[in-house]
Amino acid sequence: MAEKAYPAAPANHGYQRSDAESLENADELKRKKKIKLAIYISIFVVFQIIVITTMSLTVMKVKTPRFRLGNINVESFVSDPAAPSFDTKFTTQIKIKNSANWGSYKFNAANITFQHQGATLAVIDIAKGKAGWLSTIKRNAEVSLKSSATNVSNLGSELNSGVLTLNSVGRLNGKVAIMFIMKKKKAANMNCTIAFDVAAKTLKSLHCK
């Protein structure tokens, strides 16, 4: 009986990957993953630096609050160049401006001194308090000033000139608290020049620095 002939199996001409090449591809994938991870970490670090820098230049930067007089409403003004003398009464606002800070400003009790050519006319007290973050507080005050409290030799000539110039000075001591984690001492100074129109018996100008 004749034997059956079976066709030979076709030769496998396809590419077979070696173990070395498989390891090499695995290492390449790991290397790419490490590069991506390094890129993500770098982006995160740069982002954090930008955030910290922005906060340090804005939120965490503490500025000195402003301490000023506000609007002055003259209730009475009497003067006599011959005597010489003057007597005035007015209302004003005491402003503590903390609008530049991202934290509250807590200040101690203080006072404001009204002067004429360096001589003290009157002193008013300011109770301790707190100005909130990015805000301004205003306190009303009534002021009475008389020349009898001073002895200025050229008062008569000043009244004859038509303008009486007074000054108000003061100092607030306190602390600005940022995000409940940082407190920084800040002193706010007042230095205002008040000019009255003698003939009109009104306020001529108010300048604070």
Image: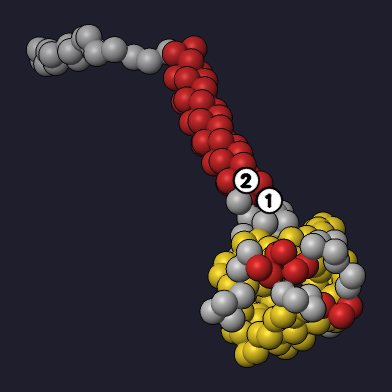
Q: Is residue 15 above or below residue 85?
A: above
**Viewer-proximal residue among 73 and 155:** 155
**Res. 3 visible in picture:** no
- Residue 203 occupies quadrant: bottom right
Q: Which residue is mark 2?
A: 57
Report crowding for label 2: few under 14, some 14 to 19, many 20 or more residues within 10 A (C-alpha): few
Report crowding for label 1: few under 14, some 14 to 19, many 20 or more residues within 10 A (C-alpha): some
User: For the view shown, which residue lies furthest in the front direction?
Assistant: 82
The residue located at (68%, 70%) in the rendering is: 159
**Res. 193 visible in picture:** yes
Scheme of colours in the image: secondary structure
Q: Amino acid at mark 1?
A: Lys
Q: Which residue is mark 1?
A: 61
Q: Is residue 100 above or below residue 199?
A: above
The residue located at (56%, 41%) in the rendering is: 50
The residue located at (18%, 13%) in the rendering is: 10
- Residue 84 occupies quadrant: bottom right
Question: In the image, 48: left or right of 181?
Answer: left
Q: Residue 48, labelled with which disc?
A: none
**Viewer-proximal residue among 49 and 76:** 76
Question: In the image, 82: left or right of 133?
Answer: right
Give x and y (percent) for residue 198. 61, 75
Q: Are marks 1 and 2 in contact (CB under 8 Å)?
A: yes
Give x and y (percent) for residue 150. 88, 73
The residue located at (59%, 81%) in the rendering is: 201
Q: Amino acid at mark 2?
A: Leu
Mark 1 to mark 2: distance in Å?
Answer: 6 Å
